[in-house]
Amino acid sequence: MKFTLNLMAASAALALSLSAQAGEVEVLHWWTSGGEAKAAQGLKASLQAKGHTWKDFAVAGGGGDSAMTVLKSRVVSGNAPAAAQIKGPSIQEWAREGLLQPMDEVAKAENWDGVLPKVVSDIMKYQGHYVAAPVNVHRVNWLWANAEVLKKAGVKAAPANWDEFFVAAEALKKVGVIPLAHGGQSWQDFTVFESVALGVGGADFYRKALVQLDPATLGGPTMDKVLETFRKVKSYTDKNAPGRDWNLATAMVIKGEAGMQLMGDWAKGEFVAAGKVPGKDFICAAAPGTAKSFTFNIDSFALFKLKNKANQQAQRDFASAVMSPSFQELFNLNKGSIPVRTDLKMDKFDDCAKLSNADFLATAKSGSLVPSIAHGMAVPSATEGAIKDVVSQFWNNDTVTVAQTKQRLLSAAKSL
Ligand code: GAL
């Protein structure tokens, strides 16, 4: 009898301690495409392996504009998720509101300072404290192409500059395929714009115009060339582009309906999820004129303050899982990006990822590593939104002139 009672007490205590440890992590993200969802699945699995519950808070919409709107309303109603996909300067904006939870304990125990490049850790910290955990490094300045379609059109190699791009686009048109797959959503227009700006103007121009928002550069003669090139690029997209999701544009390249796409390397996740092989079925190349530069886009999860003790523990375990070598490898193999840790081997990664990794390190040294403005890495979110609108208006309305757009860019840059 005594034994049975002891046993009951012991099992009750065990149940209590397990339930005290097991928490729930609600995670806001916008990874709903094929490749993205596969990548996110790995994170969910590693959390569940620690006994926690994953509460999925996925808000569809590439680039995350809808996700950010939903996040704001949730936070305003006092119901923030444990973790939200928030990037770049926005991390500082949320932290300034006093809403984010410092993760120093985990970061210190796991030596985040030692394994992250400084350009990354600086973004994750607010006043010296880690308030977000980075997942990957995406490169935005990529061009994706269907290898067979290029061959059919007689295009021997991916275009190395914008002149070559237009020659290739003409050749693709002649064989009856859409030269450039595009999804007409403002963030996608902006993604193409920043690659054109980088390719036409170079990294110094990009930094001055789109990171430092220098008026003389924003309104200078190189911007004329950028905008003219950008408008010409549009003439090689199809009339059904407006509103199309980015992954459907990628699918057009995968199926050979279109020849090329200008998109960050989350597009590679779609090719890979469709069983396509880089170098054989599809080509990855730096966007025209940008081989020596790198626009970076780092996905990260900002961690919100929570009240429940078990959920706080689950949140710490989440941060630790995000940074773990095994997760970083698995996630990035599916996502198309590269691990953010500098201490991981790249042998399981394909040539596109190896090129990205080598270029990330080389451009960090040469000074041509620049933050992506279209993906929330370069300027405060309000300024980014204002500039994005100007770029989209120019792309969508041929009656808007280059001169008008330069003026509008200058006022948008001051719109803080
Ligand atoms: C980017 C994000 C990527 C990918 C892409 C398309 O902003 O960093 O992870 O999700 O949007 O939705």
Image (tube, rainbow, N blue to C red):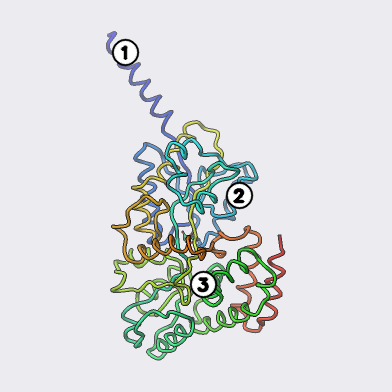
Question: Which numbered tag is attached to residue 6?
Answer: 1
At label 2, which amino acid type do we have? Answer: Gln
- Residue marked by disc 2: 92
Camera-near label (2 vs 1) is: 2
Which quadrant, please, contains the N terminus? Answer: top left
Which quadrant, please, contains the C terminus? Answer: bottom right
| Proximity of marks 3 and 2: CB atoms separated by less than 8 Å | no
Q: Counting other residues with Cα less than 10 Å from the Cα at mark 2, is it few (<14), some (14-19), or many (20 or more)?
A: many
Label 1 residue SS: helix
Side (left or right) of 372 relative to 402: left
Q: CA distance from mark 2 to mark 1?
A: 52 Å
* Residue situated in front as seen by the camera: 10 or 380: 380
Q: Is residue 45 above or below residue 237?
A: above
Side (left or right) of 222 relative to 173: right
Give the quadrant of residue 203.
Answer: bottom right
Give the quadrant of residue 178.
Answer: bottom left
Residue drawn 47% across and 50% down? 134
Give the mark, 1 or 3, whose residue is nearer the N terminus: 1
Q: Residue furthest bottom?
A: 174
Q: Tell me where residue 284 appears, x and y as whole percent.
A: 38, 71
For label 3, being within 8 Å of ligand 1 is answered no
Q: CA distance from mark 1 to mark 3?
A: 68 Å
- Residue marked by disc 3: 195
